[in-house]
Image (cartoon, rainbow, N blue to C red):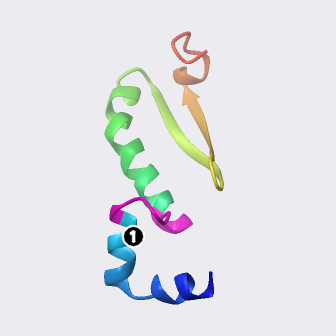
Amino acid sequence: MSALRNAVKDEVVYGVLAYHDLVKPPKQKLEQRLQAAFDEVRPSLKSHNGDVELVAIKLPDVVEVRFTGTCKSCPFLI
């Protein structure tokens, strides 16, 4: 395990491992990816007076979001 930790410090090795889904991105990169995804859907949500925001990232597999505005009571989300 320590050899793997040392190997992923090299950005080329990390890139190859990440490409093959053998390592997960750091939490900060995950947050950036989530924000990018929110930015893609945000115009549609705002057209209905709603929005989405990141509440928490609970690794390894939970992301909490909050829908605001009219989205918080949208029957599509329930």
Vertical placement of 1 versus 58: above or below?
below
Which residue is painted at 41% across and 42% down in the image? 38
- Residue 61 lies left or right of residue 18; in this view the side is right
Magenta segment main secondary structure: loop
Which residue is painted at 65% across and 56% down in the image? 59
Vertical placement of 25 versus 74: above or below?
below
- Near mark 1 (Cα within 10 A), the count class, few <14, some 14-19 or many ≥20, is some
Which residue is painted at 34% across and 27% down in the image? 44
- According to the picture, the residue beneath numbered tag 1 turns out to be 17
Vertical placement of 18 versus 48: above or below?
below
Highlighted magenta segment, given as a residue range: 19-29
**At which x and y percent is residue 10?**
39, 88
**At which x and y percent is residue 33?**
41, 55
Q: Looking at the figure, which quarter contains the N terminus?
A: bottom right
Residue 23 forms part of the magenta stretch: yes
- Residue 41 lies left or right of residue 52; in this view the side is left
- Front residue of 5 and 27: 5
Circle 1: residue type: Leu
- Front residue of 52 and 29: 29
- Front residue of 24 and 64: 24
Q: Quadrant of residue 63?
A: top right
Which residue is painted at 33% across and 63% down in the image? 19
Q: Looking at the figure, which quarter contains the C terminus?
A: top right
Vertical placement of 42 versus 39: above or below?
above
Total label count? Answer: 1
**At which x and y percent is residue 41?**
36, 34
Q: Secondary structure at mark 1?
A: helix
**At which x and y percent is residue 23?**
48, 66
**Which residue is at the far top?**
75
- Residue 55 lies left or right of residue 52; in this view the side is right
